[in-house]
Image (spheres, helix red, strand yellow):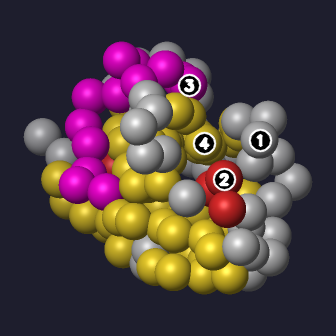
């Protein structure tokens, strides 16, 4: 069982930056691949970024490549999403998720545990 708690969301102007954090409560954090997803208003949840257990491999959605960066601290059991050059279309609820299987999966159904989400709003 994994409990995930996101923080760091808020309101930011276009072009600004935010850093999201995800705290994990589990005894075996490194076995989990971690991902960030987002759900814009009225749309389906979508993959944003993912990272493998030791932090050596990452994947990004094309829409955030070169603007967002995912990282993890396995000692503190934390996952981070650094978001730069934010755009209004980045507005969404952002979710942290943990997956037991796969390399760095990109599908919603591959993830076993989810946080409650944190709102990110980017104003134009």
Residues at marks 1 and 3, CA–CA distance in whole angstroms: 14 Å
Q: Quadrant of residue 22?
A: bottom left
The crowding category of the residue bearing disc 3, from other C-alpha atoms within 10 Å (few below 14, some 14 to 19, many at least 20), is: many
The crowding category of the residue bearing disc 4, from other C-alpha atoms within 10 Å (few below 14, some 14 to 19, many at least 20), is: many
- Frontmost of labels 4 and 2 is 2
Q: Position of residue 9 (x, y in %)?
A: 44, 74
Q: Which residue is mark 3?
A: 106
The number of callouts visible is 4
* Contact? badges 2 and 1 (CB < 8 Å): yes
- Magenta stretch? 105-117
Q: Which residue is mark 1?
A: 63
Residues at marks 3 and 4, CA–CA distance in whole angstroms: 8 Å
* Contact? badges 4 and 2 (CB < 8 Å): no
- Frontmost of labels 2 and 3 is 2
Q: What is the chief secondary structure element of the magenta stretch?
A: loop
Please check the rendered image and state whether residue 116 is part of the magenta-colored stretch, yes or no.
yes
Which of the two discs, 3 and 4, labels the residue nearer the N terminus? 4
Q: Which residue is mark 2?
A: 89
The crowding category of the residue bearing disc 1, from other C-alpha atoms within 10 Å (few below 14, some 14 to 19, many at least 20), is: few
Residues at marks 2 and 1, CA–CA distance in whole angstroms: 10 Å
State the quadrant of the C terminus: bottom right
Q: Position of residue 36 (x, y in %)?
A: 50, 47
* Contact? badges 3 and 4 (CB < 8 Å): no
Q: Secondary structure at mark 2?
A: helix
Residue in the picture at 49% in, 20% down: 107
Residues at marks 2 and 3, CA–CA distance in whole angstroms: 20 Å
Which of the two discs, 4 and 2, labels the residue nearer the N terminus? 4
76 above or below 42?
Answer: below
Residue in the picture at 48% in, 67% down: 120
Q: Position of residue 69 (x, y in %)?
A: 71, 59
Q: Is residue 69 left or right of residue 48?
A: right
């Amino acid at each position: 069982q994994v409990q995930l708690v996101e923080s760091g969301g808020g309101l930011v102007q276009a072009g600004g930056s935010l850093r999201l954090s995800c705290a994990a409560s589990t005894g075996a954090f490194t076995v989990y691949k971690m991902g960030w997803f987002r759900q814009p208003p009225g749309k389906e949840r979508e993959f944003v970024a993912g990272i493998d257990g030791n932090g050596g491999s990452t994947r990004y959605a094309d829409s955030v490549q070169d603007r967002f960066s995912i990282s993890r601290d396995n000692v503190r059991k934390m996952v981070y999403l650094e978001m730069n050059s934010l755009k209004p279309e980045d507005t969404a609820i952002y979710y942290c998720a943990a997956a037991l299987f796969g390399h760095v999966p990109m599908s919603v159904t591959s993830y076993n545990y989810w946080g409650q989400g944190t709102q990110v709003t980017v104003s134009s």
